[in-house]
Image: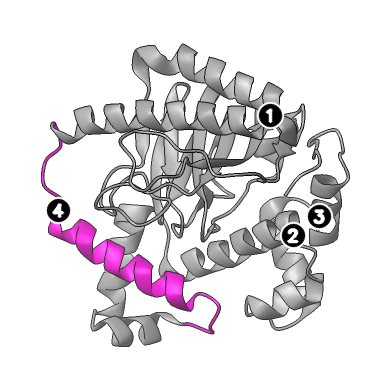
Amino acid sequence: MVQMVQMKQEGETLRYSSLFLGDTMPKFKAITILGDDFNQQHPCLEHVHKNTLEILFAYRGDAEYSVNGTFYPIRAGDMILCNAGVPHGDHPKRSHMLSNYCCAVTDVYLPDLPPNCLVGEHENPVLPCGNYAESVVGIMDTIYSLACCGSQLEYACSALSLSLLVLLRQLLQERKDRESPVDKTDLLVERIKRYLDLHYREALNLEDIGTALRISPSYLSHLLKEKAGWSPIQYVAYRRIGEAQSALRYTTRPIGEIADSLGFRTLTYFDAVFTKYVGMPPKEYRRLHLSGGREETVLPGR
């Protein structure tokens, strides 16, 4: 089961005094409720949102979720913070029996962080909410209910999103004081993933990646499998399908154009690979997410 509502942002800028930079309030964009039945059948693979911060909250079940190529165990009460520009998504062969909210916001400006980012590059993006979990459910439910009423309540949704961001900032600061320095191998893994994120649309092999990064191909593959749980070539495949899912859900681009832009040789090959990982062909995936079917309800908005 998937329920989704999106909202167009209009009207004058709201001003406020807070922990955030600038003089504008972070803007609510969309909220989605994803049931474990849908997540299990149709995993959403790695994808990127260039100008949007996504906040996922697990309210039931457990799963393994990837952020920036690293898998994290997720259970009820955990928040997953997906910065703008950072790949995130499910692995088709790993557990994703999870029911969760996904709240998308933009215009988030924090000191010492890029726009629409809530955690640093090397920070753990999974944040247990502990005693605040029930309050987070209440906030998410209220945002969804108000968003369903239409754009006339967009400011209320943005205000509630801001309260959620302030709470997360506090929890992150408390955790930061307890963290140990980052391991050097973790930094190397980040370097590998950054390269793959820049070149995943290209025809890559292990030798080419190793040469470009000046790392032994065998060590490169071993390190990424050990730290992230997949090989470089697998990571490229999952990124392509994840980006395809995002394009199918949020744009009207022709399927053939999407396949070509992601480096697939033919539309037939794209259809086969997409179906293998997602559990349905791309045409059906788009129809399901845009037609207001049982698994997802799309309401008017951006």
Note whether residue 55 is visible: yes
> Element type at marker 2?
helix
Mark 2 burial class by Cα count in 10 Å: few <14, some 14-19, many 20+: many
Q: Position of residue 236 (x, y in %)?
A: 51, 69
Q: Label 3, on which residue?
A: 286
Amino acid type at mark 3: Arg
Q: The N terminus appears in which quarter of the rendering?
A: top right
Q: Quadrant of residue 215?
A: bottom left
In terms of sequence position, does the residue under pointer 2 or pointer 1 come before the other? 1
Amino acid type at mark 4: Asp
Q: Label 4, on which residue?
A: 183
Q: Quadrant of residue 224?
A: bottom left
Whether tag 3 and tag 2 are in contact, CB under 8 A, the answer is yes
In depth, the one of 30 and 200 nearer the eye is 30
Residue 153 is labelled as 1
Q: Residue at x 66, y 56 (%)?
A: 277
Q: Label 2, on which residue?
A: 248
Mark 4 burial class by Cα count in 10 Å: few <14, some 14-19, many 20+: few
Q: Nearer the viewer, mark 3 or mark 4?
A: 3
